[in-house]
Amino acid sequence: MIEFLSKKEIWGLILLIIIGFVLSILSKWFIKKVLLKEKDIHKVRKAKTYVNLFGRIAKIIIWLIIILMILQLYGFDVKTFVAGLGIVSVIVGLALQDTLKDILGGITILANDFYSIGDIITFEEFTGEVTDITLRVTKIKNFNNEIKCFTNRNVSSIINHTKHNYIYYLYFSASYETEVEKVEKAFSNIIKLIKEIPGVKTELVKYLGLDKLDESSINYGIQVASKYTDQFRIKKEINKIVEKEFKKNDIKIPYPQIEVHDAKII
């Protein structure tokens, strides 16, 4: 038993495994230290994505080296083994073409900065926050905490809502009895109040004018811009502002009406 425990293969194996764990932890710490120095929120998200991905790559490389060292410790001819990997890699590459496409997609995502962890993206009508990016797949979580995974080869189908300002259009109705000039004067003040809402991109807020003559109302439109995640809060604030200003200026918000004519039968 003592002879068994004194063998270099046993202690070498234990030592190499410990070294593997230590190097894995240190490599991730070092990558974080180097990359997570930015203050800009977009650059921070990008850095976190790099940390996540490079940390995993470093871990794979470290453990491959450790495995080769363990094989050498137990007498395997590592040089012949590594040389043989060339032929094996060709066979595996042909068998795993889709996987290689996913890995190339992951590299493309990073190289072209298509999206990062924390960005809001849409894939096949599913919108959510990017929670994880690996070399093969991306995970996104929507506002209902539902999670969707998709392979990175689908990067061309992604819509990113975070990189630029999110522009949206809101429409409000006023009755036909209210003069257009009166409504437009009210909207002049509404636009000023909207620009005071935190998170609104003031330079992109616009009054679009009379949009449509509906059955029971005249519809007026406005353009608003903000971060994608701020839109829901801002829409609520705008609705409150419009309702208050319409009341203040005695502008009636219409309800559906049907005009009935009493026709005489001749």
Image (cartoon, rainbow, N blue to C red):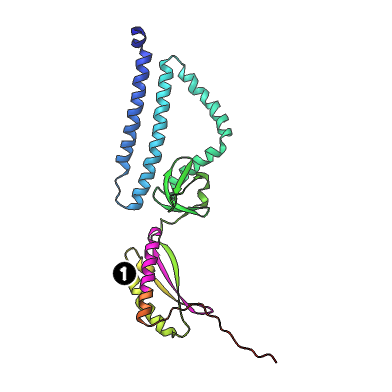
Q: Is residue 21 above or below residue 100?
A: above
- Depth order, front residue of 36/4: 4
In the image, is residue 237 part of the stretch drawn in magenta?
Answer: yes
Q: Secondary structure at mark 1?
A: loop
Q: Position of residue 33 (x, y in %)?
A: 29, 40
The residue indicated by pointer 1 is: 196
Residue bounds of the magenta highlight:
212-241
Q: Which of the 4 image quarters holds residue 7?
A: top left
* Farthest residue, direction bottom: 266
Q: Quadrant of the C terminus?
A: bottom right
Q: Position of residue 25 (x, y in %)?
A: 33, 32
Q: Which of the 4 image quarters holds residue 6?
A: top left
Q: Residue at x 35, y 31 (%)?
A: 24
* Farthest residue, direction right: 266
Q: Quadrant of the N terminus?
A: top left
Q: Position of residue 173 (x, y in %)?
A: 46, 76
What's the residue type where badge 1 is placed? Glu
Q: Is residue 154 above or below residue 178?
A: above
Q: Residue at x 38, y 43 (%)?
A: 50
In the image, is residue 119 part of the stretch drawn in magenta?
Answer: no
Q: Is residue 161 above or below residue 9?
A: below
Q: Residues within 10 Å of mark 1 (few under 14, many from 20)?
A: few
Q: Residue at x 35, y 73 (%)?
A: 241
